[in-house]
Amino acid sequence: MRNKSFWAITHGFISSEDTKVLTLLYQPLIGQEALGLYLMLINLVDRNKLQSELFSLAFLFDVLFLKADEFESQKERLEAVGLLTTLVKDEIFLFKLSMPLKARQFFNDGILGAYLKSEIGEKNFKLLLSYFAVKEISEKGYQNQTKTFDEVFKVKELLSFQADGFILSRKNSSGIFLKESFDFDKIYQQLPIRIKRKSIFTKRVISQIAAIMFVYNFSKKEIIAILSDSYDEENRSLFQERIVLNARIYYEKTYGEVEIAPKTKQSDEIDLTLLKPQDIINSINPKMTNKAFALNTIREFVSRNAVDIGLINAVIIAALKYHENLPSLQYLEKVLSNWLAQGIRTGHEAYQIIQKIDANKKTKRKQVKTSDEPAWLDEVLAELEREWNEGT
């Protein structure tokens, strides 16, 4: 691996505020070595070209005092939290560096915020929260006199514009792919008048609503109440982070202790596209200690991967049959990637794999902390691959 080369690109450079977020919020999750790798890569990037020269991986190993396996482990940590995307062509790696979330986005994130709290404890979490918190400035009594574009500029004809160069920017998720129908129009028609405005329901917001309804199995009445509570009256907007947070709070308060009895008789193949994540969790492991956190992980898994929903459910089932608690997003996506590489594209194709998995494996297999995933993930993937090959 030392003989391979790499280059790095980014769409911006970290500010002092970004450094605070990286140090105080990301570092407790990824560790000092992973943070050091991120800072090394971003500082190799030329500020004018927004890309680095071509370097050998040996240079990176020597400067950071890392062995090949240690480098791979730290790289995966950066990938897992969304700071790094890795592409490879022949013997050359392309590392695409992403900017860290803003502090507010991090704390409101359904995965990162919850995971940080579980890692450092509630007391330390509140301490960090108070460090980044600022007192909101009251605008009470002020009237908005801001002019719009068309009030200031008078343009007879707007000419089309096309940039000749490529402008780097943060790439957003393409949304989710659900085989079952999702009729947003029916939800929209039942919304309260104060939030019934098409402009605030962007594709990303609608995608988030679809993922939340799928993961938590909310009714239309419930999701409407959540959207109503999430509406920001002052900004007249809907923020994704607030929708996710309110959905999680509502679920924990309303369904935190609910258990659904598993079906005991199954003579035919199950249509995996019809299963709901909470049904899967309660059927396989009804005593899971943190169902709300697991559902947040699944919501993120659904949102980030536009594949057949039956295949998504198959990955979740396979993971739960090996582990008492749902593994991390990184684990789920590696299993999914492994199956896709083998040509498994649908829940029907994955069904024969999960049918062979012995549910007792999760009690026989030695439990390993999720932070050490790279050490045990290969073993699980190899086992799943053997079962797939035996069935074909």
Image (cartoon, rainbow, N blue to C red):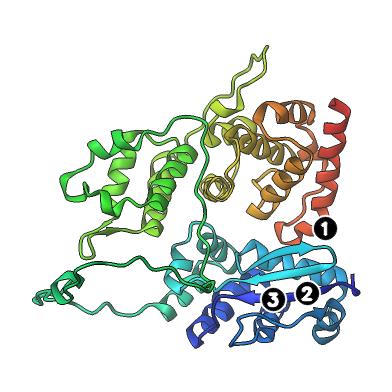
Task: Judge whether residue 165 can be spotted in this image.
Answer: yes
Q: Which quarter of the picture shows residue 314?
A: top right
**Could you classify mark 1 by the number of other residues whose Cα lies within 10 Å: few (under 14), some (14-19), or many (20 or more)?**
few
Rendered image quadrant of residue 166: bottom right
Q: Is residue 259 above or below residue 204?
A: above
Placement of 15 over or under 97, stated as above or below: below
**Element type at mark 3:** strand
State which mark lies toward you, 3 or 1.
Answer: 3
Residue name at image x 72 percent, y 50 percent:
334
**Place of residue 178 in the rendered image (x, y in percent of width and height, measured from the top left):** 51, 36
**How many marks are shown on the rendered structure?**
3
Residue type, label 1: Ala
Residue appearing at x 40%, y 36% in the figure: 218
Residue type at tag 2:
Phe
Say left or right for 374 vs 248.
right
Residue 288 relative to residue 77: left or right: left
Disc sitting over residue 8 in the figure: 3
Q: Is residue 319 left or right of residue 257?
A: right
Q: Nearer the viewer, residue 60 or 127?
A: 60
For residue 375, the mark is: 1
Residue 2: % across, % down:
90, 74
Q: Are marks 3 and 1 in contact (CB under 8 Å)?
A: no
In the image, 264 versus 187, the foreground residue is 187
Residue 249 visible in the current orientation? no
Badge 1 marks a residue whose secondary structure is helix
Sequence order check: which comes first, mark 3 or mark 1?
Answer: 3
Mark 2–mark 3 distance (CA, rounded to whole Å): 7 Å
Q: Which residue is mark 2?
A: 6
Q: Amino acid at mark 3?
A: Ala
Residue 124, above or below 234:
below
C-beta proximity under 8 Å, tags 2 and 3 = yes
Single out the residue that lies furthest toward the top.
267
